[in-house]
Each structure stands twice: as C-alpha cells, then as structure tokens.
C-alpha cells in the first residue's frame, strides 16, 4: 500500500549555501501523485508567472556543486533536496507535497534525522493504491575519472559504499547495509554531511556555504574533527554518503529493489547512473509490491523507537 504523511509538518532553518532563512512544509498528497516540490515564494508572488511546481524526478536534476539541484521547465530551481528525499524514502512515504519558501531546503543539523523525527511524530497515512517498486533486472554502471556507481539485481534495497579521503579523520571507509526493517532510520539518518576545512574556506571565499556551521556539518582538518562533540559514529562520513545515495535514488520515482554500489561516488554520479538505467532496455521494470516485498522496503515497520536507537 502507498503511504503519505498524516498531516502538515513544518521545518524552519537556513539554506546551507545562501544562509537565508527558509521554511519548509511537508503535506499529505493524493495516491499515485509521488513527491512534488513547490517553491512557495514563487507561488505567492503575483508578479512571477512561472510554474512553482518541480517534480522530484531524476530527469529534472541539473549540474550543481555539492548538492542535488532540480529545475522545472520555467527555470524555477530548488537545491539540497537529498536529505528530505532520503527521509521520505527511509520512512516509506511515496506521496507528499513539499513546499519551500526559497531556493534551498533547510539544512537543519546536516543530517536527515530532524526530517525523520518530524515525519514519524506526525504519523503516516496508509492509502488505497497499490505500491509499485522499480526492480533492477541487470547491472548498469557508470564511471568517471574518480568514481564508479552501479545498480545490480537484489531482492531488497541495498547500499554498498566505499570512500577514500586523504584526511586522517576520514581515511578509507566501507559500509554495506540492507535498507529494510528501519535500517535507514537507525543506521544512517543521524549522519551529517561532512567537508574539509580547506573546502569550507574555499566555498566561503566564493559565496557558498554561507549557512554552514560546525554544528550542521562535520568539518575535518586532516586528523582533527573540528565540529563540537566530534563524530556521531566512527564511520559517520561513509554513512552520510549512503544517506545521500538513498535520497538521490528516490528520484527514480519509486522505491528500488536492487543493490547500489558506490565507489567514491556522489550526487552527480548517482544521477548519471539513473539516466543510464532508464536508457538501458531490459535493465529495469516496475513491479507491484506484495506483502512479502513490502516488508523488505526501507519504510517497512519504521517507528520512533528506530530513531531513538541511533541517539
């Protein structure tokens, strides 16, 4: 069965790159409508005749630095959608309207946990429509000079990730998880975005990351973690990369039954992978989800207790 949120959920914060205040409201949506974003500031401006609606879909993603950016045919954009997309996917929400009062989703604490907390506190509503999933039928892979991403057949949603950073505080990290039985909420949702201090300095000099702080990102300087309290988990960076991947993969428009393998990949490479998948005949199929399959999807049986388990 499909699910939406039971009532409106409001989040207030700042945009990571602009530093500007932003309000986001996640609202219930009808069956078979999927995830839709609305720029509420554009919608409220009578002098702006552009369409304020942007579908959460792989083919409206445009190149961007350090985040996932979507743009509709009228040029209306929204960035940094990956964490709320991961939260929706991880909670099993397939229909929702997400209204945002500016060009960026609020960064909050740099993880998906505040979004998950809000969604689970509001509750989920089961809808009448049959749920469909995107089943991977044969491997599809994309490579760049520095990264590789692959989707291959599996009975559930799995993520396998490898990162390798010169900074000793991160280094080489590997993680594999099946995304069923609340694993996303327990294992990944609280893991924050991360960067090197040199990157922060560069971004600030170029007018980026104006809303970034040591509290909403893990900032490292070689062997030192500069953020107060240090890492939430010893392998928080690779877990956050898995969080990002789940959010970006949900732009396929349905939960995925398949294994994602990322080797130093990021937002752009994951989007390239989705584009390659949909361009490859016989590599995928939509399937109607039965009870046994539903139990293997990310949002199956998720509760607030799963979130508390990662605290």
Image (cartoon, rainbow, N blue to C red):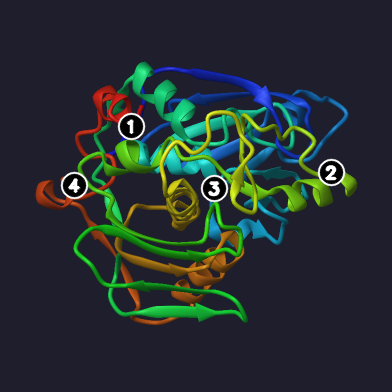
* In the displayed structure image, the side of residue 37 where residue 258 appears, left or right: left
Identify the residue at image location x=84%, y=33%.
Answer: 48
- Confirm whether residue 92 shows in the render: no
Mark number for residue 294? Answer: 4
Of the two numbered discs 1 and 4 in the rendering, the one whose residue sits closer to the viewer = 1
In percent of width and height, residue 185 lies at: 33, 36
Q: Is residue 7 above or below residue 64?
A: above
* In the displayed structure image, the side of residue 90 where residue 146 appears, left or right: right
In percent of width and height, residue 180 lies at: 23, 47
Of the two numbered discs 4 and 2 in the rendering, the one whose residue sits closer to the viewer = 2
Identify the residue at image location x=72%, y=40%.
Answer: 51
The residue that mark 1 highlights is: 310
* Quarter containing the N terminus: top left
Cα–Cα span, label 4 and label 3? 22 Å
Do callouts 3 and 1 mark residues in contact (Cβ within 8 Å)?
no
The extreme left residue here reads 292
The disc, 1 or 4, on the residue closer to the chain's N-terminal end is 4
Q: Is residue 82 above or below residue 100?
A: below
The disc, 2 or 3, on the residue closer to the chain's N-terminal end is 3
The residue that mark 2 highlights is: 204
Q: Residues within 10 Å of mark 2 (few under 14, many from 20)?
A: some
Badge 4 element: helix
In percent of width and height, residue 49 lies at: 82, 36
The disc, 1 or 2, on the residue closer to the chain's N-terminal end is 2
Do callouts 4 and 2 mark residues in contact (Cβ within 8 Å)?
no
Cα–Cα span, label 3 and label 1? 28 Å
The answer to which quarter of the image holds residue 157 is bottom left
* In the displayed structure image, the side of residue 153 where residue 200 appears, left or right: right
Cα–Cα span, label 1 and label 4? 23 Å
The residue that mark 3 highlights is: 56
């Amino acid at each position: 069965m499909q699910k939406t949120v039971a009532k409106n959920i409001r989040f207030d914060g700042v945009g990571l790159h602009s530093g500007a205040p932003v309000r986001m409201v996640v609202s219930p949506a009808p069956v078979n409508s999927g995830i839709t974003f609305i720029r509420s500031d554009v919608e409220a401006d009578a002098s702006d005749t552009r369409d304020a609606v942007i579908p959460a879909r792989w083919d409206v993603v445009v190149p961007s630095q350090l985040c996932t950016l979507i743009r509709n045919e009228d040029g209306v954009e929204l960035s940094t959608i990956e964490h709320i997309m991961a939260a929706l996917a991880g909670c099993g929400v397939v229909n929702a309207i997400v209204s945002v009062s500016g060009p960026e989703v609020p960064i909050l604490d740099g993880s998906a946990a505040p979004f998950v907390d809000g969604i689970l506190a509001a509750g989920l509503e089961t809808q009448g429509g049959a749920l469909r999933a995107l089943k991977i039928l044969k491997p599809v892979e994309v490579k760049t000079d520095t990264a590789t991403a692959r989707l291959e057949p599996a009975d559930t949603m799995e993520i396998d990730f490898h990162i390798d950073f010169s900074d000793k505080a991160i280094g080489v990290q590997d993680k594999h998880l099946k995304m069923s039985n609340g694993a996303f909420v327990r294992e990944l949702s609280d893991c924050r975005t991360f960067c090197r201090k040199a990157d922060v300095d560069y971004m600030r000099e170029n007018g980026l990351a104006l809303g970034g702080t040591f509290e909403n990102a893990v900032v490292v300087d070689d062997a030192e973690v500069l953020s107060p309290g240090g890492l939430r988990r010893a392998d928080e960076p690779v877990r956050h990369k898995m969080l990002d991947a789940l959010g970006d993969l949900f732009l396929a428009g349905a939960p995925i039954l398949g294994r994602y393998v990322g080797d130093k990949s990021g937002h752009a490479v994951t989007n390239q992978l989705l584009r390659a998948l949909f361009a490859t005949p016989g590599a995928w199929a939509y399937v109607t989800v039965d009870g046994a399959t539903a139990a293997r999807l990310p949002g199956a049986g998720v509760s607030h207790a799963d979130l508390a388990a990662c605290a």
